[in-house]
Amino acid sequence: MVETSPSIAIVDDDPAVLKALSRLLRSRAFRVQTYESGQEFLAALPAGLPDCLVVDLQMPEMNGLELQQHLVSNGIAIPTILITAHGDVELRDQPSLVASLRKPLQEKALFDAINKAVGTSPSAG
């Protein structure tokens, strides 16, 4: 059986964040899809679920927490990492939430959270 690298979906309304995170994750052999809004991500779901979702908390129309709660309420459990440039948010007891990280993201914390989400051991690097 051939193992494929985990797929990561990134949802952020900032194109610079999408580009930087996408490059970083691809450099570690993750398969990456980027979306500029929660609605765009939801529209892509019929094509398949990612192994992990990295989503910005502060976005217009549908914020990251609303997106995560929408998924859970529809029976879609995707391990989710919430990222924010704004202060701490109370996130206890949120189903599927693996971590909440502050921007600017620390590479080690991001990869630790992704490894926890996809159930892999940390890679050397």
Image: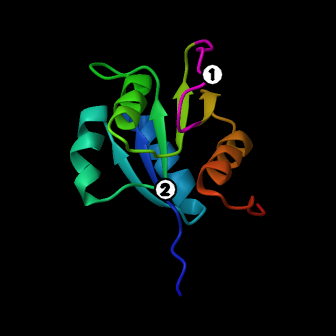
Q: Which one is earlier in the sequence, the residue at label 2 or at label 1?
A: 2
Q: Answer with the quarter of the image where residue 93 lies.
A: top right
What is the crowding at mark 2: few (fewer than 14 residues within 10 Å), some, or many (at least 20)?
some
Closer to us: mark 2 or mark 1? 1
Tell me the kind of residue under disc 1: Arg
Q: Which mark is residue 51?
A: 2
Residue 16 drawn at (x, y percent): 43, 36
**In screen coordinates, is 19 left or right of 62?**
right
Q: Main secondary structure of the magenta part?
A: loop
Q: Is residue 90 magenta?
A: yes
Which element carries disc 2, helix, strand or loop?
loop
The mark tally for this picture is: 2
Q: Which residue is the extreme one toward the bottom?
A: 1
Q: CA gap, disc 2 to disc 1? A: 22 Å
At 59% from the left edge and 56% from the top edge, which residue is drawn? 118
User: Can I make out residue 31 in this image?
Assistant: yes
Identify the residue position indicated by label 1 in the image.
92
Residue 124 drawn at (x, y percent): 78, 63
Tell me the kind of residue under disc 2: Asp
At 24% from the left edge and 40% from the top edge, which residue is drawn? 40
In this view, the residue in front, 60 or 45, is 45
At 55% from the left edge and 14% from the top edge, which residue is drawn? 86
